[in-house]
Image (cartoon, helix red, strand yellow):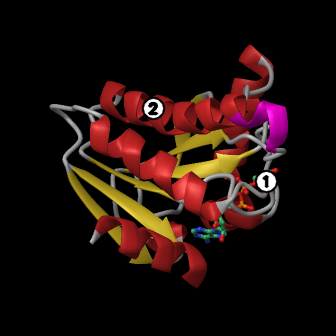
Amino acid sequence: MKIQVVKADITEIEVDVIVNAANSSLLGGGGVDGAIHRAGGSAILDECRDIRNRQGKCKTGEAVITTAGNLPAQKVIHTVGPVYNGGERLEREKQDLTNCYLNSLKLAEMNNFKSIAFPNISTGIYRFPKELAAEIAIKTISNYKSETIKNVIFVCFDDENYQIYIARLK
Ligand code: APR
């Protein structure tokens, strides 16, 4: 599996599937969630609503898949990252973030996708420390063995994340 880091807007990335840092409602929000819904159009929200009506909210660490609407990607995987509190919940939060990456990879494999792009899940509004989040993301992806997925792109929108990922992956 080839791993790349780019500084970009994930809505412009041409891969089979992009990952959204959603919230449990699946009904959109700010950050990358807002960007994906704005650029992708209402078809994404329509499918999110259908999923919500069928199975209820998306739990932290879980992932669901929808159309990508007007985006260059074929699909969007919506995963819900942990809100960072640290302290005695830290181990659970680290596992939840790991599960976001694992469950997104599994969904991509189930759909026979070869390329997937991730934002820096939980490191914005959910306040997860960027260094720790990068360590978890890179370790999870690097340890994941797949016959299907050939290309993983970490898409950093802010420079701080970009520098962290470049330093960790050089
Ligand atoms: N492309 C790529 N990455 C982006 C983009 C974009 N267009 N916009 C923002 N980001 C980056 C942020 O810089 C941050 O590094 O996505 C990362 C995750 O930040 P958030 O989008 O705030 O997501 P998160 O911290 O997981 O919080 C999720 O925010 O938007 C709401 O509905 C969402 O309630 C949920 C919460």
Image quadrant for the C terminus? bottom left
Nearer the observer, 95 or 33: 95
Relative height, residue 147 to residue 28 (above, below): above
Can the viewer see residue 158 in this picture?
A: no
Coordinates of residue 62 in the picture (x, y in percent): 62, 27
Relative height, residue 121 to residue 90 (above, below): below
Residue lying at the far front in this picture: please name it.
Answer: 87
Examine the structure image and report whether residue 88 is included in the region drawn in magenta.
yes
Ligand 1 position by quadrant: bottom right
Disc 1 C-beta below 8 A from ligand 1: yes
The disc placed on residue 62 is: none
Residue lying at the far top in this picture: please name it.
Answer: 55
Question: What residue do we see at 49% from left, 72% from top?
Answer: 164
Residue bearing the label numbered 2 = 102
Tell me if 167 is positioned left or right of 79 in this view.
left
Examine the structure image and report whether residue 20 is included in the region drawn in magenta.
no
The rendered magenta stretch, by its main secondary structure, is classed as helix
Q: How far apart in space, not on screen, are marks 2 and 1 (Cα)?
A: 19 Å
Nearer the observer, 1 or 58: 1
Tell me if 126 is positioned left or right of 75 in this view.
right
SS under mark 2: helix
The numbered mark, 2 or 1, whose residue comes first in the sequence reads 2
Can the viewer see residue 150 in this picture?
A: yes
Quadrant of the rendered structure where residue 114 is?
Answer: top left
Residue bearing the label numbered 1 = 126
Label 2 crowding class (10 Å Cα cut-off): few <14, some 14-19, many 20+? some
Coordinates of residue 50 in the picture (x, y in percent): 72, 28
Relative height, residue 159 to residue 92 (above, below): below
Q: Which residues are magenta?
A: 86-90
Question: What residue do we see at 51% from left, 57% from top?
Answer: 134
The kind of residue on which mark 2 rests is: Leu
Question: What residue do we see at 84% from left, 44% from top?
Answer: 85
